[in-house]
Amino acid sequence: MILGIYANFFLLTARLTNNQFNIMLIQNISVIGLGKLGGTMAGCLASRGFNVIGVDVSYPAVEALNAGRAPAQETGLDELIYANRNRLRGTPSHEEAILGSELSFVIVPTPSDDRGAFSLQYAAHAFEAIGKALATCDHYHTVVLTSTVLPGATRYGLLPILEQHSGKKCGQDFGLCYSPEFIALGTVIRDYLNPDFYLVGQFDDRCGAALESVNTRTALNCAPTKRMSLENAELAKISINSFVTLKISYANMLADFCERIPGGDVDVVSDAIGLDKRIGRRYLTGGFGYGGPCFPRDNVALNFVGDHLGASCELLHVNDEFNRGIAERYVNRLRPYLRNNSTVAVLGLAYKPLSHVIEESSGIFLCKALSSLGLRVIGFDPLANDAARTALQNYALVADSLRACLQDAETVLITTPDDAFKQFTGEDYLGEKSSVTLIDFWRCLPESTRNHPGIRYIPMGHCLDDSAAASALKGLWRGGSNSTL
């Protein structure tokens, strides 16, 4: 692996001029914003041998980093920060960080506004502070925006702030790149160190080369870097996320189809079509809709940009509407399995496994919808219980343990494919009850649980009534060869 990294390094240096080669010696990096991604970036960069200065307006985050603790919650981050604490330090001062580094990553929130666009409020504040620091900086410094933004934001929204407050010119005195990450909460460390590729939007070749040199030394898998204009990179980032949402919606449509044909099984269909290299298997598992802090808002934001520019965005509109309607459609499908005034357990309150985040969570939606039907709802999540308690006040109880959640439930909904739910046996799900209905949206439970004599197992995405499905399908062909389909 080390030989591979050095091979990439020397291949890259061979393509650079002497002036650019000096940039290759970057050793000191600052990370501005110590949230889930920024804190993880700092730890990962330190683990690859860089000296890292973390900056945040939150003193607890800075103090945590200086104490060798994770400044934000993310799987494995505490251990990573502690192991590399000698190359990490935190400060609230942008000037200290910029003067003490050659390249900085800016990863601050860009929340959605009421139009569906991304606000630059926090990024503008950070860029103002960076610009003032650049004014006193006597060396070339590359600023890399990592936060997700819309096309044009880097060049027309943020670059003028740097030049105004530094009194310097981009390209001559400092560099500016846009380089977002493609990570998933819960696996940020793995994703950051093993990317499919690096997306680099560059103001010019000099700053692009500086960032590529850092990427080459960071990746464990010798990932390539794709360099392009700032605007192309901004569009590429949000387009990738939006495209993935389309694939997820298509998989969920397939699951609906499979429930309506005799012997239908969405996993069998997905395994087959996923072998086609034009399609691939990733994100093709029918289950719930996409949620979390990125996918829904990125799709809406791309829609916003397209509408503003006059591009055709009907596909994005339909995708968003389809996704938002999935949970409600499932509630209607569940009604035959829910006895009035009974207790229902919802397992999985985060939007995905290994996450504390409940934003756009299907599990949260289900809890509220089932409560409105007059059912007693109790939920559990291995990581997201605290956030869920606040969101589900007056709707559902949140149990402290999986066993407590299951104790009185006669119907159990598996809304995320979390390992904790897979490891429970049929006896665990039954407890002291004689029978229980398990509705598995992801078909993730083992065969031993599915086939337990006391369990009625309902796998969504499978046909549950072959006779009725066959009757409906025959209706298409009652005219025989003269059918007008």
Image (cartoon, grey):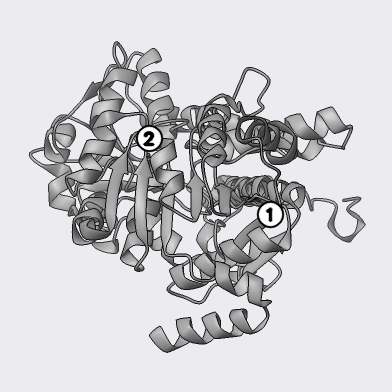
Q: x and y percent of residue 188 in the render?
A: 39, 54
Q: Amino acid at mark 1?
A: Gly
Q: Amino acid at mark 2?
A: Ser
Marks 1 and 2, Cα distance to the nearest angstrom?
27 Å
**In which image quadrant can residue 376 be found?**
top left
Q: Which residue is mark 2?
A: 93
Left/right placement of residue 119 relative to residue 443 reads right
Query: Which disc is residue 337 wearing?
Result: none
Is any part of residue 5 visible from this angle? yes
Seen in the picture, residue 116 relative to 292 is either above or below; the reply is above
**Residue sitting nearer the eye, 471 or 353:** 353
Is any part of residue 187 visible from this angle? no
Seen in the picture, residue 485 relative to 153 is either above or below; the reply is below
Q: x and y percent of residue 297 in the render?
A: 59, 33
Labels 1, 2: front one: 2
**In which image quadrant can residue 16 be found?**
bottom right
**Residue sitting nearer the eye, 353 or 426:** 353
Q: CB of mark 1 within 8 Å of CB of mark 2?
A: no
Q: How many marks?
A: 2
**Residue sitting nearer the eye, 52 or 329:** 52
Name the secondary structure under disc 2: loop
Q: Residue at x 42, y 20 (%)?
A: 369
Name the secondary structure under disc 1: strand
First of labels 1, 2 by sequence position? 2
Query: Which disc is residue 201 wearing?
Result: 1
